[in-house]
Image (tube, rainbow, N blue to C red):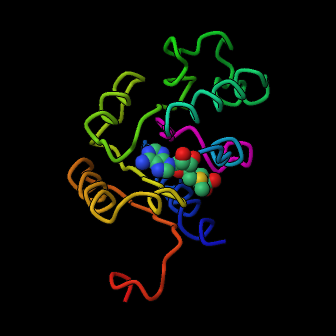
């Protein structure tokens, strides 16, 4: 519900604006939003790139699942040759149509930049939706703050959507 009102609404708004935009989902795990939103027609032709990042083993397993499923791979390729996807040797970087995934610790933002660049990268001039859903809760406050600062510095027009568990009594949440 919260993500429908934030993440999906942000994407819908950008689609309605009619200009290209991109999505970066950090700590995406096995989230299937890309496929679901594409199937629903929410994620349309204005989405230049929908890129996900997670630890390498998670991305490898997700890529393996996508490649084993012609429906999922077909959703990425959208009429393109199903074989024209690209992935690196260990399968922790993958690009198929406007969908991509990279394996790395997202708090290591220099490495994240390099990995994203290896699959076509993000265009800093485009409106960008950055999603962190139940992922930054696993990193230190300092690392999360540094990540937010990276988003603010990296993209001129960004919508950062953070959906995390909080400990109400924790000093920073008061
Ligand atoms: C609870 S799952 C949430 C997955 C997805 N966002 C969702 O809501 O379905 C947390 C994910 O964050 C990833 N994660 C946690 N810390 C990370 C980090 N520093 N770099 C990359 N991925 C991270 C984990 O590997 C895991 O896939």
The answer to whether residue 166 is visible is yes
Horizontal relation, residue 107 to residue 134: left or right: left
Q: Is 64 in front, or is 151?
A: 64
State the residue at coordinates (56%, 64%): 9
Task: Pinpoint residue 56: horizontal percent, then vertical percent.
Answer: 50, 31
Answer whether residue 7 is magenta in the image.
no
Q: In which quarter of the image is the C terminus?
A: bottom left
Image vertical order of residue 61 relative to residue 166, above or below: above
The answer to whether residue 25 is visible is no
Horizontal relation, residue 150 to residue 5: left or right: left
Q: In which quarter of the image is the N terminus?
A: bottom right
Task: Pinpoint residue 142: horizontal percent, then vertical percent.
Answer: 27, 62
Image vertical order of residue 49 relative to residue 7, above or below: above
Task: Pinpoint residue 168: horizontal percent, then vertical percent.
Answer: 47, 86
State the residue at coordinates (51%, 67%): 163
Image vertical order of residue 96 relative to residue 125, above or below: above
Q: In which quarter of the image is residue 114?
A: top left
**Magenta-highlighted residues:** 38-54
State the residue at coordinates (65%, 43%): 30
Task: Pinpoint residue 167: horizontal percent, then vertical percent.
Answer: 48, 80
Q: Is 36 in front, or is 57?
A: 57
Tag count in the figure? 0
State the residue at coordinates (53%, 14%): 86
Answer whether residue 44 is magenta in the image.
yes
Horizontal relation, residue 136 to residue 91: left or right: left
Image vertical order of residue 25 relative to residue 103, above or below: below
């Amino acid at each position: 519900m919260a993500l429908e009102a934030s993440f999906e609404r942000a994407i819908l708004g950008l689609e309605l604006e009619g200009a290209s935009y991109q999505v970066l989902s950090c700590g995406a795990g096995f989230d299937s939003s890309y496929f679901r939103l594409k199937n629903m027609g929410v994620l349309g032709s204005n989405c230049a790139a929908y890129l996900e990042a997670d630890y390498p083993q998670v991305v490898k397993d997700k890529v393996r699942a996508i490649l084993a499923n012609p429906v999922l791979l077909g959703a990425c390729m959208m009429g393109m040759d199903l074989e024209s996807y690209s992935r690196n040797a260990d399968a922790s970087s993958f690009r198929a149509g406007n969908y991509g995934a990279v394996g790395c610790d997202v708090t290591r933002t220099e490495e994240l930049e390099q990995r994203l660049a290896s699959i076509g990268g993000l265009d800093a001039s485009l409106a960008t939706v950055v999603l962190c859903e139940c992922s930054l809760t696993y990193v230190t406050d300092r690392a999360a703050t540094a990540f937010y600062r990276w988003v603010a510095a990296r993209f001129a027009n960004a919508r950062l959507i953070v959906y995390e568990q909080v400990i109400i009594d924790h000093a920073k949440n008061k």
